[in-house]
Structure formats: C-alpha cells, structure tokens
Amino acid sequence: MPTPDDPKALFDVWDVMKLAIGTAIGTIATLIHQNFKYRFEELSDRCDDLCRTASNAADLASDYWLSEASEGNGDKLIEARLRGYQSRIMGHWVNLEDRFLEKDATPIRRANVRLFDALTGGEFGSSGRKVDLFRAAEAQDATAELEVLLRRALRNTIPLRSIGTITAQRLKGWSRD
C-alpha cells in the first residue's frame, strides 16, 4: 500500500504526461478556434459597417431622386453628402476586398459600380433635374444586391464551410451531382 510520502501514490509520471499533453492539445485547439472566431467577427463587423453606410446612402439618394431640383443650398448639401457616402463605401470596400475570394469580390465590385451609378448618375447635380423614379428604386435595389453579395462572400470565408455544407446537403438527400 502506497504511503503519502511515496511520490507514486499521487501520480505516475505517465499520468502527468497524459495530463500535460491533453492540456496542451486543448489549449492549442482553443487558441486556433478563438483566432478564427475573432477574425470572422471582425470581418463581419466591417461588412455591417459597409452595409449600413450603403443603406444610408440609398435612403438619401431615394429622397434626392424623388424630388425635383430646388433653388438654394438644399440640393447641394445632399449632393455633397452623397459624394461623401460614396467615398466611405469605397473606403470600406478597400479594407475588405483582399479578405474575400476573387470569385466573390468581382460581383461585389460590379454591385458597387451599379450602386454608385444609382446614387450619382443621370442628371445628378443638374439644375434642371426632374424626379427620377427609376434611380430612386435603383438605389435601393443596388444596395440590396450589394448586401446579399457581401453576406455570401462573408459565409465563404468560414474555414471548412464547404465540407459542412456538402455533408448537410447529402444527409438531407440533396446532391449537386
């Protein structure tokens, strides 16, 4: 019978090694998971910022295109704000662009061009500007498209996402084959 003075009574060396190895593996796995989680949440927050800015710009542009040109500084102030929104949207996109796969980034670039045309295209800044229902709606449509494309691109940045998606689809009996 081991006594309390006997070191083998508490732990065998192999037990200590197993405990140390298990702890190291758990710590490394946790650090890797937390790193991916932090990066994904940071990227998600940046996408939210871009979507919020684009939505605010679309709302302002819709108001702008639903009214005729007026005398005074009212239109000039809105036009300046819309140009500012474009700069902010482009700044957000420059910060995000390299984080997405090229197959996802290309449609987002096209959606940005479509949004910018809806915001400041046509008779933008013209003193004879008339109500433009198409551009008012186009600003909202282009923003919605941009948001959908950003969210899809964001999902594609999740590590091992395709393996999980394919497995879930096959378990449901659905296949792309």
Image (spheres, grey):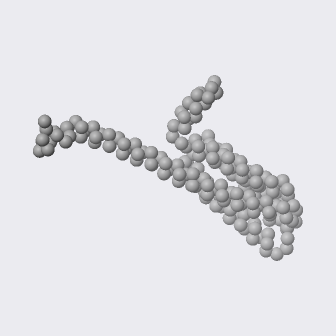
Residue 160 screen position, x and y as percent: 51, 37
Residue sitting at x 71%, y 66%: 81
Viewed as shown, does residue 42 lie left or right of 30? right
Residue 57 screen position, x and y as percent: 71, 60
Residue 86 screen position, x and y as percent: 68, 60
Picture quarter containing residue 176?
top right
Residue sitting at x 54%, y 38%: 161
Residue sitting at x 24%, y 40%: 16
Q: Depth check: 56 or 17 in front?
A: 17
Picture quarter containing residue 29?
top left
Q: Depth check: 14 or 111 in front?
A: 14
Query: Can residue 94 be seen in the rendering of this structure?
Result: no
Residue 159 screen position, x and y as percent: 51, 40
Picture quarter containing residue 87?
bottom right
Residue sitting at x 75%, y 66%: 79
> If the image is split into quadrants, where does the N terminus sit?
top left
Query: Can residue 5 be seen in the rendering of this structure?
Result: yes
Residue at the front extreme of this rendering: 1
Q: Depth check: 117 or 137 in front?
A: 137
Viewed as shown, does residue 6 lie left or right of 57? left
> If the image is split into quadrants, where does the C terminus sit?
top right
Residue at the top extreme of this rendering: 177
**Is 68 rendered above or below residue 141?**
below
